[in-house]
Structures are given as structure tokens and as C-alpha cells.
Image (cartoon, rainbow, N blue to C red):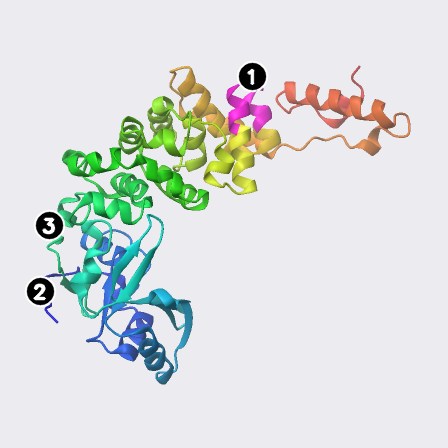
């Protein structure tokens, strides 16, 4: 096997000295296994590492045999497609046999196993993900991808049209990787954008789960604004999020940074808007509830302290950001301080405090009136003051 070595990953790369990684490599043969994809890319870019995935010319059956001989547990995660999870010291590592695509339908591929690392590299999506490394850290670059990775260029491997038609999810992955890894000075690859614009119909074939996962990852990037803007211009955003509009996204991201808030993909999704979002992105009940609360708060004038009291500090802080973005206003960090008090406030009156004098609807109405009075006092009125109020 031709193994052109171009570089060595930084010495501080965690997987170089991880005893669990070493155990798997020694079980399978240190000359037979390679780190691949995200963990190599992140090592080259000196980023916090992705999960460690491995690739090998060994068949899945041979991977299982060698792992068992070394006393390691295996799980047939996707054995028909060449992937076996090998567990060492409580950590699972996906080990995938080199593959080449035989047939694809835009969502899934029929593959054949290979012993050629270059064939395996060609079925990957972007050049910066087509890097391999030996257990000792020597980088293997079958397609000459290392310069793109070092320059933080996001380019499809070889023909962009072909890569997209193999799996239309790669359209969304292109924008996600741009948001997370690209050097903004490079702009967007023109060939990629041309291929994307001519293949937006294929996005309709994707499952809501896959689209939702990519959108969450994209919107969680430190600054997804340029990527989402180009998604909008290329017609991709309207395909995955009909009615979505990136106008508010920039102000929202700016205000998050100003207020020292961690990126919140749900807040950013609320800023984009769009119809039928829960089903189109297959949101969990919890995430859908948060999104609904944010959208409701954008269309009504419930005081933000009351939102903090009823729904918590994080949602209230997001409402502050959304309302400021809508009004094209800035917000200072001290604007959030009163929300912490509101979020921790506890209504001092209980139903039994008003019984037996009141019951049923009358009891509920009185509790609601007292609670609103207490909220209007900035949560200051005491139990005694509320009980003696008219």
C-alpha cells in the first residue's frame, strides 16, 4: 500500500497517548489501523478533538477476531457497511474497513470493501476530512488534502456534483463545516456553490432527523451568520426551513456575544423563523417547547421578569435578545441581572392559605390575582402584605 507521509500531528494530540486508543491499535496491529476524519483534522488545526474513528484494510470479521483475541469487546455497529465498534477501557471506537461506493441513491450507499486507502478517501465528503494518521501520528494524505485543511478551505473531494448526488446531506454539511472550520478570508468555493444550487431538489429526499441534526450543529457554531446567509442566497434555506429568514440572525449572534451568552441553536432557530419547524427538523418535545416559548414571546409583550419567573432565566435572556434584535437595539449585560432574581423567586402564597374561605374557581381567581400583584411589585411583596391586600 502506498502511504505518502506529509506531516506529523502535533505532539500534544490526546489520542497519541490515550491508552484505550493504543489498546485497540495494538490488538488490530499498529501497521493495520489508521485514525481518520475529524480526529485527524482537529489535530492538524489544533482544535479540541472529535471522537476518535479508525480505518483499516482488515475485513470486519478480521477486526472482530483480532479484538477478541486481545480480550476486547466488539459491537457490530454497522458490520454490513464495514463498521465494528471495539471497546477498550470502557470507551468504544468505531473501526471501519476501507470502502468504495458501488451504488448510491442520494441518501445511502451500497459499498464494497477495499484494501486501497485512496479509494476509501475518495468516498468521503470534503478534502479536510480525507486525512488519515498512523497510531504514531504520521499523517497519510492519499488525495493531497492537507493544504486545504491547513488553509481551512472547505472543498468537496474531486467532483462536487458527484459528491452531493452520493448523499444530499452533504449540502447541509458543507455549510456546517464552513461555519465551524473555514477561514472567512477564503470565501465560499465557487464550484461547490454551483453544484449545490443545481441540486437543491435532492434535499427533499432527506429525513427530518438528518436535516434537524445538521441544522442544530450549524446553528451551534460560534458564528453561523455567513454560512446561513449563503444558504439563503443559494435556495437551500427555503428548502429545509420554508419561510426562514436570516435577517435577525446577525443581530442575535452579536447580542449573544455582547451578553456573554453561549451560542444557543434554539434561540438562533427562533430568529430564523419558518413554518412547521418542529416536524421539518424533528425537534424533541423539550426543544419544541423552548422554541414555541421564544416565538410566543416575540409576538406578545409579557414582561421579561415574568417570563424569567415562569420559564427560567435562560429563556428570559433569549427573549431579551430576540426583542432587542427585532427593535434594532443594543442591550447591556446589567439588563440580565434582575432576571436572575425573578427566576429564583417563589410565590409566597399557597392555596391552603386562602381556604376554606375560598374554593373552586374563586380560589383560583384569587391566587392568580395575588400572583400578578406580587409579580408587578418586582417580587417584593411579602406573604403578610399580600394576604392583607384588597
Q: In the rendered structure, find residue 301 and report the number of the disc placed on it.
A: 1
Where in the figure is residue 82, as x and y percent of width and height? 33, 67
Report the residue marked by disc 2: 4
Dominant SS type (magenta)? helix
Report the residue marked by disc 3: 147
Asked if the residue at tag 3 contacts the one at tag 1, i.e. Cβ–Cβ closer than 8 Å, the answer is no
The Cα atoms of the two marked residues, 1 and 2, are separated by 63 Å
Asked if the residue at tag 2 contacts the one at tag 1, i.e. Cβ–Cβ closer than 8 Å, the answer is no
Q: In the rendered structure, find residue 280 and report the number of the disc placed on it.
A: none
- Let me know if residue 45 appears in the view: no
322 within the magenta span:
no
Camera-nearest residue between 49 and 317: 49
Q: Earlier in the sequence, mark 1 or mark 3?
A: 3
Mark 1 crowd level (few <14, some 14–19, many ≥20, 10 Å Cα) = few
Asked if the residue at tag 3 contacts the one at tag 2, i.e. Cβ–Cβ closer than 8 Å, the answer is no
Rendered residue at 53%/34% (across/down): 290
Where in the figure is residue 338, as x and y percent of width and height? 52, 26
Q: Earlier in the sequence, mark 2 or mark 3?
A: 2
Q: Is residue 348 left or right of residue 341?
A: right
Label 2 element class: loop
The Cα atoms of the two marked residues, 2 and 3, are separated by 14 Å
Camera-nearest residue between 328 and 56: 56
The Cα atoms of the two marked residues, 1 and 3, are separated by 52 Å
**Quarter-of-image position of residue 90:** bottom left
Q: Is residue 199 left or right of residue 302?
A: left
Amino acid at each position: 500500500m502506498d502511504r505518502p507521509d506529509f506531516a506529523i500531528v502535533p505532539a500534544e494530540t490526546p489520542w497519541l497517548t490515550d491508552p484505550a486508543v493504543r489498546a485497540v491499535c495494538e490488538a488490530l496491529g499498529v501497521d493495520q489501523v489508521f485514525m481518520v476524519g475529524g480526529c485527524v483534522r482537529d489535530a492538524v488545526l489544533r482544535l479540541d478533538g472529535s471522537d476518535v474513528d479508525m480505518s483499516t484494510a482488515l475485513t470486519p470479521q478480521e477486526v472482530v477476531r483480532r479484538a477478541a483475541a486481545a480480550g476486547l469487546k466488539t459491537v457490530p455497529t454497522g458490520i454490513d457497511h464495514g463498521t465494528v465498534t471495539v471497546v477498550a477501557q470502557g470507551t468504544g471506537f468505531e473501526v471501519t474497513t476501507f470502502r468504495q461506493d458501488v451504488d448510491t441513491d442520494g441518501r445511502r450507499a451500497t459499498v464494497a470493501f477495499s484494501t486501497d486507502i485512496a479509494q476509501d478517501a475518495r468516498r468521503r465528503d470534503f478534502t479536510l476530512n480525507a486525512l488519515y494518521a498512523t497510531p504514531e501520528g504520521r499523517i497519510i494524505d492519499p488525495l493531497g488534502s492537507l493544504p486545504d485543511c491547513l488553509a481551512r478551505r472547505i472543498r468537496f473531494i474531486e467532483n462536487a456534483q458527484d459528491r452531493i448526488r452520493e448523499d444530499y446531506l452533504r449540502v447541509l454539511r458543507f455549510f456546517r463545516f464552513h461555519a465551524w472550520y473555514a477561514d472567512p478570508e477564503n470565501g465560499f468555493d465557487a464550484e461547490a456553490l454551483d453544484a449545490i444550487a443545481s441540486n437543491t431538489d435532492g434535499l427533499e429526499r432527506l429525513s427530518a432527523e438528518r436535516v434537524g441534526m445538521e441544522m442544530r450543529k450549524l446553528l451551534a457554531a460560534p458564528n453561523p451568520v455567513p454560512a446561513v446567509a449563503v444558504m439563503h442566497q443559494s435556495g437551500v434555506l427555503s428548502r429545509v426551513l420554508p419561510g426562514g429568514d436570516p435577517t435577525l440572525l446577525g443581530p442575535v449572534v452579536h447580542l449573544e456575544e455582547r451578553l456573554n451568552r453561549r451560542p444557543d441553536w434554539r434561540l438562533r432557530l427562533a430568529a430564523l423563523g419558518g413554518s412547521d419547524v418542529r416536524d421539518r427538523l424533528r425537534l424533541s418535545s423539550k426543544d419544541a417547547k423552548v422554541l414555541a416559548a421564544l416565538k410566543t414571546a416575540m409576538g406578545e409583550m409579557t414582561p421579561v421578569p415574568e417570563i424569567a419567573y415562569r420559564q427560567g432565566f435562560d429563556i428570559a435572556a433569549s427573549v431579551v435578545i430576540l426583542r432587542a434584535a427585532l427593535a434594532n437595539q443594543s442591550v447591556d449585560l446589567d439588563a440580565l441581572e434582575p432576571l436572575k432574581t425573578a427566576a429564583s423567586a417563589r410565590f409566597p402564597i399557597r392555596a391552603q392559605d386562602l381556604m376554606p374561605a375560598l374554593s373552586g374557581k374563586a380560589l383560583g381567581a384569587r391566587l392568580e390575582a395575588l400572583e400578578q400583584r406580587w409579580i408587578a411589585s418586582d417580587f417584593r411583596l411579602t406573604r403578610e402584605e399580600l394576604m392583607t391586600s384588597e
